[in-house]
Amino acid sequence: MTRSEYALPESGFVFCCFNNNYKIEPQIFDIWMRILAAVPGSVLWLLVRFPIAEDNLKREAQARGINSDRLIFAQYHSKAEHLARHQLADLFLDTFYCNAHTTASDALWAGLPIITCLGKTFASRVAASLLTAVGLPELITNNLEQYEQLAIYLAHSPTALQEIKQKLAQNRTTYPLFDTPRFTRNLELAYRVMWDIYAAGKSPQAIELKSEK
């Protein structure tokens, strides 16, 4: 598959975010537009469900001094094709208040690095958890300024980005994130401990398990 099949430029850096559009709020969109301004020739590849969302995003890009042509809109496709087209992008930009969840897992499984900013709520910490579980904590930022700077740095540092992609390719099959048998064993162990507490007539309590490998 090629970039031209998806209306992407053959050259230039491709940022993407395949999160639902309702997760895109003004603060993160401001940052995305500043990132595009700092990386000449770059585009932002977004997934849209409704034409009105596409129109709104184009208008907001123009209002921030970015040509709306630099927003490329993807359509919905089969799961296999969707995973495969991730390889046409260079870097996934996460949303803030509500992170990528399954979308982040898809990107990482497809070999596409994702940068995120650690929030204070469950929904804003999911991507950081996934990155930790796949051994890429260097893609977790602690504030939006760091997030913006990291995105710009990686776009201008092809060697550093390639090293991260190679690390992801190696960790994908060796770290816990996608180790389903390991997850299953640990989940079953948790259920066993819960049952033992209940069967002993004890009140519900916090449990801590030593992860099985």
Image (cartoon, helix red, strand yellow):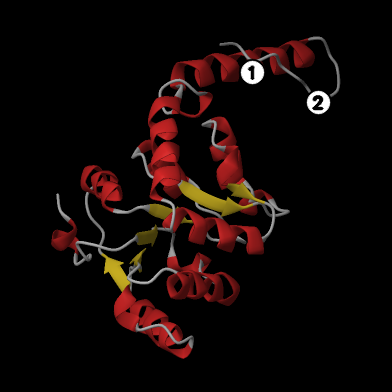
Say which residue label 2 marks: 206
Residue located at (86% from left, 23% from top): 203
* Tag 1–tag 2 contact (CB < 8 Å): no
Above or below 5: residue 88: above
Task: Measuring from the top left, give residue 156's x and y in whole percent.
Answer: 43, 58
Say which residue label 1 marks: 191
Task: Measuring from the top left, give residue 177's x and y in whole percent.
Answer: 50, 29
Residue located at (54% from left, 76% from top): 30
- Nearest the eye: 97 or 136: 136
Task: Measuring from the top left, give residue 100's x and y in whole percent.
Answer: 50, 52
Above or below 5: residue 201: above
Mark 1, mark 2: which one is toward the viewer? 2
Q: Secondary structure at mark 1?
A: helix
| Residue 92 left/right relative to 185 | left
Residue located at (34% from left, 78% from top): 54
Residue located at (50% from left, 23% from top): 175
Q: Secondary structure at mark 2?
A: loop
Mark 2 surroundings within 10 Å by alpha-carbon count, few (fewer than 14), some (14 through 19), many (20 or more): few
- Nearest the eye: 172 or 54: 172
Mark 1 surroundings within 10 Å by alpha-carbon count, few (fewer than 14), some (14 through 19), many (20 or more): few
**Which numbered tag is attached to residue 22?**
none
Tag 2: amino acid = Ala
Tag 1: amino acid = Tyr
Above or below 67: residue 46: above
Tell me which corner region of the image, top left, top right, bottom left or bottom right, holds residue 28: bottom right
